[in-house]
Image (cartoon, helix red, strand yellow):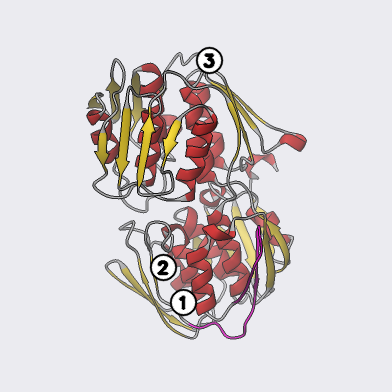
């Protein structure tokens, strides 16, 4: 099992290029199910979740070609015949891909059998909102031995109001609605850039969608979709992670090939912390402004502060002067990194959904355990400023969503290396 060895103390200097967004790529790969034609996706990140989804699509009968060489971030998907429309547990147990293929499978084939979702153990990710919406569109849904089975002759348009904002629910039902008969109106939708990215692909495939990126989306169903070529958005969470890495190390780091307008809430918090920020058209430069200052955060749906940046910001807060309050409003079990940060010398206490970080503390090297994807990133950030050499175990979590993070960090001066069997035979 791979480990990272990180020696702290080096400011990060230089430029890091951002990969495509894993959380955009996964629903876009699922959208290829909706057509018999070839879908070409560019700027696909080389992370473990993408490989898992590739295996899932292949297991259902699709042809999936991941690029190599100069085309290494391009994927060709053709779902000409879906011979086995089942999302098997042994494939999806490490991620939420099952919920993302539910809508397109039933829309395309009239039948879907999917394992209940897996992924990081950061709290419940119920798909009751998906099921309620699909039932309103005419699907008959049963649950049996850990699988959901949905059947219909053809989905019908419906007026659906999500009881609460759900990103995967919005994406799943959006994909179902594009082939449904009639008009579907979705209210209380997620506004994340990943939803907008999916809608852009579906539109390129011939779907009729209005309102993506707002709380109300209107879809007029069509009889069929065709193939398309689409470029995946840059990963705003990877970009944010590296902005925090530059800030926590007191470096001068240019985060390139990103979408700065997707990072507004994080950039505002970094400026409150006293970090100097320069925003360009497709890059953000972060420079030390001297001593970091505490700034409270409260995670919210987009465009609020993202839950996927909470752990990394907490690492930064350990180095800020004053007390930082971190309130987690999205997931109920997303403070598992706190114990590991405290092992490194942080002073963090948790009460319910609120963590209190008392900075500024000198972090020390330690052997720590990665518990989920973003918690892993927070431990990397902490190790970059800790005294001595830290060992991070179970970094397969970080491989799910960050492309060659250790190589990117080494390129800007970090002392980090991987031990053990190298993911992807790099």
Q: Give the label, 3 or 2, closer to the camera.
A: 3
Q: Residue at x 58, y 85 (%)?
A: 291
- Estimate how packed mark 2 is, as few (under 14), some (14 to 19) or many (20 or more) residues with alpha carbons within 10 Å: many
Residue 198 rendering spot, x and y as whole percentages: 49, 39
Queried whether the magenta region covers residue 356, the answer comes back as: no
Quick check: 320 left or right of 302? right
Magenta segment? 276-293
Q: Nearer the viewer, residue 412 or 414?
A: 412
Residue at numbered disc 2: 338
Task: Say whether disc 3 or disc 2 marks the residue closer to the N-terminus.
Answer: 3
Q: Position of residue 21 (x, y in %)?
A: 56, 47
Report how far apart the C-alphas of labels 3 and 1 lie in the structure. 53 Å
Residue 205 sits above or below residue 170 on the image: above
Q: Quadrant of the C terminus?
A: top right
Residue lying at 67% horizontally and 54% vertically, measured from the top left: 257
Relative vertical location of residue 58 with respect to residue 165 in this rendering, above or below: above
Instruction: Say which residue label 1 marks.
Output: 346
Name which quarter of the figure residue 363 lies in: bottom right
Q: Nearer the viewer, residue 383 or 34?
A: 34
Q: Earlier in the sequence, mark 1 or mark 2?
A: 2
User: SS class of the residue under badge 3?
Assistant: loop
Mark on residue 80? 3
């Amino acid at each position: 099992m791979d480990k990272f060895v990180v020696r702290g103390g080096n400011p990060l200097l230089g430029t890091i290029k951002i990969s495509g967004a894993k959380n955009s790529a996964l629903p876009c790969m699922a959208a290829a199910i909706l057509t018999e034609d070839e879908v070409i996706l560019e700027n696909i990140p080389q992370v473990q979740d993408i490989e898992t989804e590739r295996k899932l699509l292949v297991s259902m009968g699709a042809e999936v070609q991941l690029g190599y060489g100069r085309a290494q971030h391009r994927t060709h998907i053709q779902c000409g015949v879906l011979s086995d429309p089942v999302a098997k547990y042994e494939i999806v147990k490490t991620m939420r891909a099952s919920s993302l293929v539910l809508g397109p499978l039933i829309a395309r084939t009239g039948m879907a059998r999917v394992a209940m979702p897996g992924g990081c153990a950061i709290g419940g990710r119920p798909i009751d909102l998906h099921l309620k919406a699909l039932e309103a569109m005419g699907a008959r849904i049963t649950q049996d031995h850990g699988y959901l089975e949905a059947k219909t002759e053809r989905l019908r348009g419906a007026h659906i109001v999500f009881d609460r904002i759900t990103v995967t629910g919005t994406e799943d039902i959006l994909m179902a609605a594009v082939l449904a008969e009639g008009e579907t109106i979705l209210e209380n939708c997620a506004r994340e850039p990943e939803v907008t990215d999916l809608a852009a692909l579906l539109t390129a495939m011939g779907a009729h969608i209005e309102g993506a990126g707002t709380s109300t989306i209107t879809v007029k169903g069509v009889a069929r979709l065709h193939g398309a070529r689409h470029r995946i958005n840059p990963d705003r969470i990877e970009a944010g992670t590296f902005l925090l890495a530059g800030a926590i190390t007191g470096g001068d780091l240019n985060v390139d090939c990103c979408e700065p307008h997707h990072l507004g809430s994080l950039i505002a918090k970094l400026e409150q912390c006293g970090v100097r920020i320069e925003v360009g058209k497709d890059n953000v430069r972060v420079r030390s402004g001297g001593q970091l200052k505490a700034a409270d955060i409260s995670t919210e749906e987009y465009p609020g502060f993202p839950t996927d940046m909470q752990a990394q910001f907490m690492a930064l807060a350990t180095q800020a002067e004053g007390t930082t309050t971190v309130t987690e409003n999205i997931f109920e079990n997303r403070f598992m990194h706190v114990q590991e940060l405290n092992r490194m010398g942080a002073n963090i206490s948790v009460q319910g959904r609120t963590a209190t970080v008392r900075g500024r503390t000198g972090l020390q090297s330690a052997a720590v355990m990665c518990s989920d994807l973003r918690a892993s990133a927070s431990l990397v950030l902490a190790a970059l400023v800790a005294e001595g050499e830290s060992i991070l175990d179970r970094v397969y979590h970080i491989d799910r969503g960050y492309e060659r993070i250790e190589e990117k960090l080494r390129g800007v001066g970090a002392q980090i290396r991987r031990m053990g069997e190298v993911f992807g035979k790099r």
